Amino acid sequence: MAEAVIGGKTLPVPRHIAIIMDGNGRWAKNRGLPRTAGHAAGGETFRKIANYCRSLGVEYLTVYAFSTENWKRPEKEISGLMTLLGKYIREGLRDMEKNHVRFCFFGDLSRLPQKLQTLCLEAQERSAGFEGVQVNFCLNYGGRDEIVKAARDFARDVANGVRQPEELTEDVFSQYLYSKDVPDPELIIRPSGEMRLSNFLLWQSAYSELVFMNVLWPDFTPADLDEAILEYHRRNRRFGGV
Ligand code: IPE
Ligand code: IPE
Ligand code: MG
């Protein structure tokens, strides 16, 4: 685990931080701008925070960008978002080569526009060897969907004779999730003032510390991340013990 100076103190940095990037729409509304402008501003924040996490020595950063429920939004907002996501992944690729960020995608990409799917695969392949922070970008991601998919894949392996039902343990099941080989997040941050998980990392969040903050995602700064890490260090993690 890396150490960094946070709020004037040298502290261990969580290995895995997850963020629900929420509040773009309200940020735009407060400024009399279309919601898409909020998503564009949120994309910029993502870049800054990903680089900051890299400089702190965070190993994994998982960000919630589009949920399985976000398809309920107006068609215009969805298509604007898909265009922006393409732009950010393309720019991210450039940044990533400079900063050695490794890109992974969690979610069912098959429902995304074809061009975006290709871009995601390209980003994943081109960055696979990088050893900076690993960014897990959650796109068309839902925690329940992920668990159902894992159960289906395990059942298929049983039907094909590759696995026995008795072999199923928590560790084996974890290997069927998008997050296989990624440790559970110690810290999950949700800006925007909402206090819920909205179907984010349902399996992986079993013992995560949850930090809810009143800032809207486009306004979120490295100082807010420091604040969340300081709050994490104030928590007493017992994992069911005493
Ligand atoms: C988060 O911001 C981005 C996505 C869900 C795609 P929102 O768009 O949910 O912003 P609010 O919650 O309406 O302010
Ligand atoms: C969660 O935010 C999804 C993302 C940030 C991508 P939402 O804005 O969709 O969640 P709810 O609707 O407030 O629960
Ligand atoms: Mg929201």
Image (tube, rainbow, N blue to C red):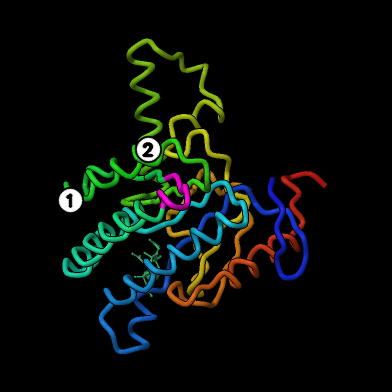
Disc 1: which residue: 113
Whether the residues at callouts 2 and 1 have beta carbons within 8 Å, the answer is no
Q: Residue at x 37, y 23 (%)?
A: 155
Q: Secondary structure at mark 2?
A: helix
Q: Secondary structure at mark 1?
A: loop
Establish if 174 lies above or below 32: above
Q: What is the C-alpha distance between the residues marked 2 and 1?
A: 23 Å
Q: Residue at x 37, y 87 (%)?
A: 30
Q: Which mark lies nearer to you, 2 or 1?
A: 1
Range of magenta residues? 96-102
Q: Position of residue 43 (x, y in %)?
A: 37, 66
At label 1, which amino acid type do we have? Pro
Quadrant for residue 148, please give it.
top left
Q: Quadrant of ligand 2?
A: bottom left
Disc 2: which residue: 148
Residue extending farthest to the top is 161
Quadrant for residue 121, please give it.
top left
At label 2, which amino acid type do we have? Val
Q: Residues within 10 Å of mark 1 (few under 14, many from 20)?
A: few
Q: Nearer the viewer, residue 122 or 160?
A: 122
Q: Nearer the viewer, residue 173 or 89?
A: 89
